[in-house]
Amino acid sequence: MADLGGRVGAGAGEPPDRVTGVTTLPARRLLLVHAHPDDESIGTGSTMAHYAATGTHVTLVTCTLGEEGEVHVPALAQLAAAEADQLGGYRITELAAACAALGVTDHRFLGGAGRYRDSGMMGLSTNEHPRAFWQADLDEAAGHLAEVMREVRPQVMITYDDNGFYGHPDHIQAHRVAMRAAELAAGQGFAPAKIYWTAMPLSVLEAGMSHFAESSDNPFAGIDDLTELPFGTPDEQIAARIDATDQHAAKEAAMRAHATQIPDTSWLYSIAGNFGAEFMGVEYFTLAVGEKGPGDGPYGWESDLFAGLDVAAGAEPSAGGAGPSVEGAEPSAGGAGGPAAGGSEPTTGGAGAPPVPAAGLR
Ligand SMILES: [Zn+2]
């Protein structure tokens, strides 16, 4: 990359076709930067499915293969890092199936599959592996992502906050790389106009905690106070609530595609059984870069990540051409967001453990 200056959020131009200079992608383009296979589905699956189904080009960049994950399928136990160390390769197939369930066709690994290795949980010796993502040179890793931005020209990017949502080193590094890539892209005029971080409103966590207080299957067991959780955002700091309840089945199917990571007995599915579409289908974000668009409710939560941007909803049909063009479905302005109701989604993602809010965090 040439110019390291400039500011983030300078706005994105149109992606030129590599050969002809003709725009081939839909007008709206959304980029997601995630740490491991499964994070996209657990954290943002409904949002991805919603935008993919309504004519937005959705690009997923996954930073590692999740090599250090546990293996919850007994027949595949030998794939684990301490055994054959083939889990990462296997998880490529799980991620492909998850993307298919979400309707997402443009998926890449940062720097190519296997360039960066899962660092494992914070403090483990796996953090020191020479290919561990935690050890990555920031500008080199960000350069790979900036190249994706140059090609796709996303107006909106989603990644994690500076604590990686819950503290996993690869999630923290994904945040750093994504934000640095936006800086590099800004210097060349194609940074995303808006950058969101995944978030969980405190009101949603509170509702979940009280709902499960008497349950024998309480994912909040051992938690006395929400401040003990590594995530949770005051409602007034939330910028967007994406209601993709009509995509909850796609999200659940995508999660089930990650069978080595999320066992059928996961509390995620038992919560889904109780809260159904609300739990699976509604996702929240804070806005880190860019100008918040119009929204609803007491805090003006956006119901569309493209709110306020001068870019049409839905696909712009084009005359084909090279590149990862995607056919759009019916254009939609996105659903109206209502006030948050029950439902709790204290996901932690993570390759090292199934997402459990309390006991699973290390
Ligand atoms: Zn993860």
Image (spheres, rainbow, N blue to C red):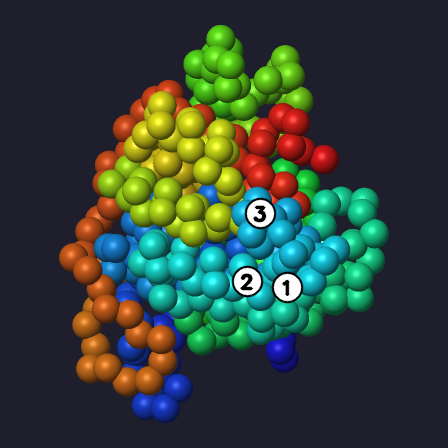
- In terms of depth relative to the viewer, which is nearer, 4 or 348? 348
Please report the residue visible at 42 percent of the width from the left and 46 percent of the height from the top. 256
Q: How far apart in space, not on screen, are marks 2 and 3 (Cα)?
A: 14 Å
Task: Give the residue number, with chain letter if any, for mark 1.
Answer: 86
Residue plotted at (36% across, 75% down) = 324
Label 3, secondary structure: give it: helix
The residue tagged 2 is 90
Q: Position of residue 279 (x, y in %)?
A: 38, 31
Q: Compared with residue 249, is residue 188 higher up or lower down, i.e. above or below?
A: below
Looking at the image, is 231 positioned above or below residue 290? above
Q: Nearer the viewer, residue 267 or 123?
A: 267
Amino acid type at circle 2 is Tyr
Tags 2 and 1 touching, CB below 8 Å:
yes
Foreground: disc 3 or disc 1: 3
Q: Residue at x 31, y 58 (%)?
A: 103
Q: Is residue 226 visible?
A: yes
